[in-house]
Amino acid sequence: MFDALKNQDPEIYNALINEEKRQVTGMELIASENYVSPAVLEALGTVFTNKYSEGYPGKRYYGGQEYTDVVETLAIERAKQLFGAEHANVQPHSGAPANIAVYSALLEPGDTVMGMDLSHGGHLTHGHPVTYMAHIYNFVRYKMKDIETGEIDFDEMLAVAKREKPKLILAGFSAYPRELDYAKFRAIADEVGAYCMMDMAHIAGLIAGKQLKNPVDFGFDVVTSTTHKTLRGPRGGLILCKKELAQKIDKAVFPGFQGGPHMNNTTAKAVAFAEALKPEFQEYAAQVIRNAKVLSETLMELGCKLITNGTDNHMMLMDTITSFGCSGQQVETALDEVGITLNKNMIANDTRPPMDPSGIRLGTPAITTRGMKEEEMKKIAAWMVDTAHHVDDHDRLRQLKKEVTALCTRFPVPGIDSNVIHTENF
Ligand code: DSN
């Protein structure tokens, strides 16, 4: 494997093999990451990367589109089938461009958008002041009413919506562990005459796998996603919408916001959507949630404080100051040392800065893809707590790393030939 790369560019080849080794020997708990299948990986590395395909199937600006039209049409039809959507645009390069394209399709500069407060779980593209979008649109917030349960404050949301008159109400999150009440979002949007949008990037695979409710079934006008998180496809974005918005959305993606689509990614998206349509994917999604429940319950039994006291999806947020007297950064760094990868994260109403916040975020999509189950979750929880209690004890951390590596090497990473790792001189 990788013979051409090895001969031609040893520096890049070595970095690649080191990354493979890192992925095989380490425990991936970043809630937004996953391992794609060998077929998705193959599709990504094909000659479709050579092709420019501005436009849409049957209406392109350049010639030579016989086969790009085949793959993009398949990707569109599979995405529609997977989520029961009337229209799909599979060209967004990732989740942020997908969200921005929707804003530009449905809003005028200065219009108001209502989204989840960032420290309560919302995403940067839902209106963080550091983003360019925050200069163009007026973002207003809703929050959790009770951070012990995660219940959204729908009364306040309605009051703010009536006062601020948003043109778009945005559900969705990148750090929120509970199921959303989509009917309430839709009702508030209807009451104030707003579009209703869901950013399902984190939970798309759990929706596709029929383990969580589907916002499309609740009449949401637009649903955006990434394709590489729980959905287990290549890096990329996706927009689903009602038929009457299809033309606006397509025009906003191209030519409004993006140039040529990345056809190798589109090809790999089509492959991933076909995988997610299979019954096995439903079992995968169910196991992701079962694993998250066991991991969260074990962490809490071991004295950890989880935001909302548990999870309904694949992710957990931990208050590390309350749990261990350590910041999220301290815990992330110590866990890195033992080969457990996750990210520091703000928690609701955090008073600490984003680069040294009060918590961490973790999730089970990647380790579930490797085949880990409930028994492994209990071990992982124990290692995490042990690590957090020994952040400065490097002998203990080295011992824990050996145990983590021994477990990880029993669970292969799809698409990585472990023989390469073991036979190379590292
Ligand atoms: N970076 C992604 C996440 O980790 O949730 C969202 O953009």
Image: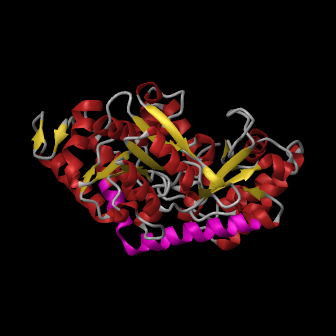
Residue 293 magenta-drawn?
Answer: yes
Q: Is residue 81 left or right of residue 184?
A: left
Q: Is residue 27 magenta?
A: no
Q: Quadrant of the C terminus?
A: top right
Observer-nearest of 252 and 412:
252
Left or right, 360 with respect to 113, comes to right
Chief secondary structure of the magenta span?
helix
Tell me where residue 376 appears, x and y as whole percent.
69, 68
Whether residue 227 appears in this view of the structure is: no
Where, by quadrant of the figure, is residue 154 drawn? bottom right
**How is the rendered protein coloured?**
secondary structure
Front-lying residue, 337 or 279? 279
Give the left or right position of residue 360, taking residue 273 as reference.
right
Position in image of residue 397 (x %, y %): 83, 49
Image location (x, y in percent) of residue 353: 71, 32
Residue in front for this viewpoint, 174 or 401: 174
Left or right, 159 with reference to 359: left
Residue 354 point in image, percent of width and height: 67, 34
The residue that appears at 47% across and 64% down in the rendered structure is: 206
Q: Residue at x 32, y 58 (%)?
A: 271
Looking at the image, how many numbered discs can be counted on the residues?
0
- Is residue 271 visible in this depiction of the protein? yes
Q: Which residues are magenta?
A: 270-298
> Which residue is nearer to you in this view: 271 or 222?
222
